[in-house]
Image (cartoon, rainbow, N blue to C red):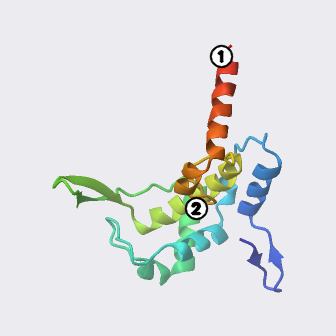
Amino acid sequence: MAVHTEYGKQKTTKLECIGKRAIHRKDTVFNNIGYVVDLDLLRECYQELDGKKAIGIDGVTKEAYGKKLEDNLQDLLGRVRRHAYKPQPSRIVEMPKEDGSTRPLAISCFEDKIIQLAVSKILTAIFEPQFLPCSYGYSERKSGVKQARMPARLDCVSNFIKHLFALRS
């Protein structure tokens, strides 16, 4: 996402920069990506989160967090940069299953959801370009169901198997 400056021009975000590097220089080893977490990224993550989702153990909602948004994000970023950020325990809710049993569902605190989304965006920017065209697992660009139906997937799988056995020979 390009960010608009105070003069109306667009600037490239740090996230876009590592995404472009991951696409164009596939041999890059990303060993220090903490600098990508900045106020712009945290603000973007805050805005993307759904305020109607269940709240965590701390009871903080998106609306409550947003009342002092800039102060809260500054504090969160400071803790991340000082390595003082510690995720809070998740609230565990037992969800009923069709067979009558239950399964545990962990619900993160709102601030933890912001950090989780930020980390997810960074990892997606780095690893998404490495997906093969025939990859059918989770990908933001593709649907697993559609990919599983593609005839080209069979060619990709057979080529992968041939490559795998060639490595073992």
Question: Would you say the residues marked 1 and 2 are in contact, meaning their CB atoms lie under 8 Å apart?
Answer: no
Cα–Cα gap, marks 1 and 2: 39 Å
Q: Is residue 52 left or right of residue 31?
A: left
* Relative side of 25 to 44, left or right: right
State the mark number for residue 138.
none
As helix, strand or loop, the secondary structure at mark 1 comes to: helix
In terms of secondary structure, where does tag 2 sit? helix
Residue for point 81% across, 73% down: 11
Q: Residue at x 83, y 86 (%)?
A: 7
**In the image, what residue occupies the spot 39% across and 61% down?**
108
Image side of residue 87 versus residue 166, left or right: left
Q: At 58% from the left edge and 61% from the top edge, which residue is drawn?
A: 118
Q: Position of residue 165 (x, y in %)?
A: 65, 20
Q: Earlier in the sequence, mark 1 or mark 2?
A: 2
Q: Is residue 60 above or below residue 153?
A: below
Quarter of the N terminus within the rendering: bottom right
- Image location of residue 141, percent across then percent down: 64, 60
Where residue 6 appears, x then y in whole percent?
A: 78, 85
| Amino acid type for the residue under numbered disc 1 | Arg
In the picture, the quarter occupied by the C terminus is top right
Most foreground residue, 119 or 73: 119
Numbered badge on residue 118? 2
